[in-house]
Image (cartoon, grey):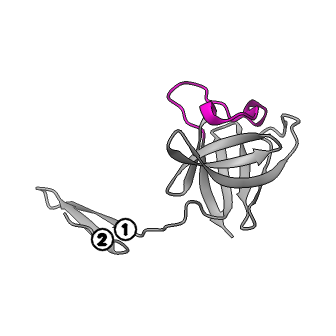
Amino acid sequence: MDLELNKIYVLELVFKDGDFVQYTFNTGASDSKIHHGEYRYDVYNEGHSILNINADGTFVLSPFHYLDGRNEGSEELHGDYGFERIDGENYLCLYIDDEKIAFDYCAMALFLDLEKTTYDVSKYNLSKKTDNQQVVFGFDTQV
């Protein structure tokens, strides 16, 4: 199937008994690397942290808040962000003094790369629990 950019498509699957299902999707494309706004990292039944990416080149990362009200005791992080080429790939980097938190980015999510991060992100509950898990900040609302 040949798809065109910025079009809406409806895919319909019809089964032998006459039942059918339809999927609607679009091929909208954006050339912006990230969206300004709020990204949220949620751990099911534990809590969440929020990353705000501001249009002026600054960011705010909130500490991890547990659902029962406890907090890690970490301060809110403030700093600048930029895009950096590391090992031939582009990363969104949050700069805190001389250290950084590095994210790969795709669509509307940010993927933490611990190997390229120098800041101690464990204080923000942003460490992988197993080799198969990724820390993903998903886009929530746009400002």
Q: Is residue 61 magenta?
A: no
Determine if residue 13 is in view.
Answer: yes
What is the quadrant of the N terminus in the image?
A: bottom left
Q: Quadrant of residue 71?
A: top right
Q: Residue at x 84, y 34 (%)?
A: 72
Q: Main secondary structure of the magenta part?
A: loop
Q: Where does the magenta region start and end?
A: 114-135
Q: Residue at x 79, y 32 (%)?
A: 123
Cβ–Cβ under 8 Å for marks 2 and 1: yes
Point out the tag, 2 or 1, that comes first from the N-terminus: 2
Q: Which mark is residue 27?
A: 1
In the picture shown, does residue 134 fall above or below 59? above
What percent of the width, then of the height, locates residue 138? Answer: 59, 52
Q: Amino acid at mark 2?
A: Tyr
Left or right: residue 105 compared with residue 74: left
In the picture shown, does residue 22 fall above or below 101? below
Q: Mark 2, residues whose alpha carbon is within 10 Å: few (<14), some, or many (≥20)?
A: few
- Inter-mark Cα distance, 2 to 1: 8 Å
Q: Residue at x 34, y 67 (%)?
A: 24
**Foreground: disc 2 or disc 1:** 1
Left or right: residue 34 compared with residue 13: right
Q: Which mark is residue 9?
A: 2
Outermost residue, left direction? 16
Outermost residue, bottom direction? 7
Q: Is residue 128 magenta?
A: yes
Q: Amino acid at mark 1?
A: Thr
Q: Quadrant of residue 46?
A: top right
What percent of the width, then of the height, locates residue 85? Answer: 57, 47
What percent of the width, then of the height, locates residue 83? Answer: 62, 53
Left or right: residue 117 compared with residue 109: right
What is the quadrant of the C terminus in the image?
A: bottom right
The kind of secondary structure element at disc 1 is: loop
